[in-house]
Amino acid sequence: MASLTGSSPGSRRRFGKRGALALAVVLAVTAGAGEMPDYVRQALAQFSTDVPKGWAYTITTVRHEQQVTERYNPARPPAEQWTLLRHNSQLPSAREIERYAKSRAGGPSAAPQATFQKADLEPGSVELVRADAERGEFRCAFRAESTGADKMLGHLSLRLIVSKRQPHIEQFVLELITPYSPVLGVKMHELLVQMKFAAPGADRPSLPAASSSHFIGRIFFIRVEEDLRVSYSDFVRAD
């Protein structure tokens, strides 16, 4: 997964390179895609798969029948930015709060991180699948330079659902094209990742609303199946 939270000199260099790639994508979409509708160009220009900096929010994660609700506030000191609100719909016990604080120790970052960034997209690959009066569905490919050492993005298909009335990405869908092994002993058979975004408003950009993932694979000879659901709420500017 891509991370935008590094603060080391190496991370800053990667930041700058990725920022330059994102700018190149925007320029290519704006200037080079003659047949691309205006609403798609506008949506891609402002698209971000991560929560923008400076926003506090509540996130609820459901995994293995365990539900955790947390509050993230970037205005607080790093060690206090995350607060455990509920565990399995109940107020957390003192022991759960203590365990949670230990797990978040060491300057935790805003999570979860996105599976890809705008700079990873190949602008010339955007292709219309279907459209109606409200939205259009497009498929895209990833830049060869963005597939990474494990070539993960190269094994995924990407679909974007784009709103026409308020140009923004309403949803993206990532799906594993064919089974493959990212590392020795690991075999991915199925992977489906979906993320939905709320429409932008007068005082806020388009923000994440919900995401889900479904995975089936094997780690050596052990079958692994996992479903993950994440919802976002209560966004407030924190700076």
Image (cartoon, rainbow, N blue to C red):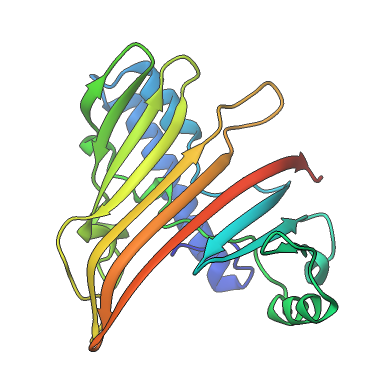
Please state if 108 lies on the left or on the right of 15 as rendered. right
- Image quarter in which the N terminus is found: bottom left
Q: Position of residue 11 (x, y in %)?
A: 55, 68
Q: Where is residue 13 in the image (x, y as percent from the top left)?
A: 52, 65
Q: Position of residue 219 (x, y in %)?
A: 28, 84
Considering depth in this image, is 95 or 194 the residue closer to the camera? Answer: 95
* Residue at 25% in and 67% down: 151
Position of residue 168 relative to residue 92, above or below, is above
Position of residue 139 relative to residue 222, above or below, is above
Query: Furthest-left residue in view?
Result: 178
* Residue at 20% in and 76% down: 181
Please state if 237 lies on the left or on the right of 217 as rendered. right
> Which quadrant would residue 163 be assigned to in this image?
top left
* Residue at 37% in and 17% down: 38
Considering depth in this image, is 77 or 100 the residue closer to the camera? Answer: 100
Please state if 89 lies on the left or on the right of 91 as rendered. left
- Image quarter in which the C terminus is found: top right
Q: Is residue 171 visible?
A: yes
Please state if 117 lies on the left or on the right of 35 as rendered. right
Considering depth in this image, is 107 or 60 the residue closer to the camera? Answer: 60
Q: Can residue 51 be seen in this view?
A: no
* Residue at 23% in and 46% down: 141
Position of residue 215 relative to residue 93, above or below, is above
> Which quadrant would residue 17 be assigned to in this image?
bottom left
Q: Where is residue 87 in the image (x, y as percent from the top left)?
A: 70, 66
